Image (cartoon, rainbow, N blue to C red):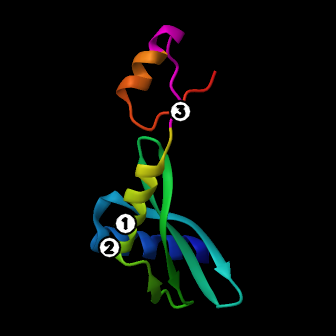
Amino acid sequence: MKSREMYETAQEYLIENMGNQVSAGDVYYDNSTKTWNVKIISKTPHGILIVGEMHLDDEKTIVYVTPGEQVLKILRFKLKEERVLIDVPADALARIKETVPDVTVYG
């Protein structure tokens, strides 16, 4: 299937040019631009993040790829902005509010 070929081409490019911190994600065909578009993803402890995109023509030639520096900026921004939920006893909330800046306590 054509989408599998595009995925493999994108994955090979990413390994060779951006290392193992990113990989190819979902592949879809954009009829308006006549390109195969592949999401660039990064697997983090908090989940999979989309950090860029690659466009290939029907001959598997790369016509666009998010530059590595921009991929890194996007990843840093998304990791910095990510919020998490924690489960702690109620009596620990006061200590957490004193210790962690910019924390919001619900409940």
Q: Magenta part of the protein: which range?
A: 84-92
Query: Which residue position holds label 3?
Result: 104
Query: Which residue position holds label 1?
Result: 73
Tell me the amino acid under the disc marked 3: Thr
- Secondary structure of residue under mark 1: helix
Q: Is residue 27 left or right of residue 18?
A: right
Tell me the amino acid under the disc marked 2: Glu
**Mark 2 vs mark 3: in front:** 3
Is there CB contact under 8 Å for labels 3 and 1? Answer: no
- Residue visible at 38% across and 24% down in the picture: 98
> Residue 76 occupies which quadrant of the picture?
bottom left
Is there CB contact under 8 Å for labels 1 and 2? Answer: yes
Q: Position of residue 19 (x, y in %)?
A: 28, 64
- Secondary structure of residue under mark 3: loop
107 or 79, nearer to the observer:
107
Whether 81 is among the magenta residues is no
> Residue 17 occupies which quadrant of the picture?
bottom left
- Residue visible at 51% across and 10% down in the picture: 89
Figure check: 96 above or below 89: below
Q: Is residue 37 left or right of residue 9?
A: right
Query: Which residue position holds label 2?
Result: 69
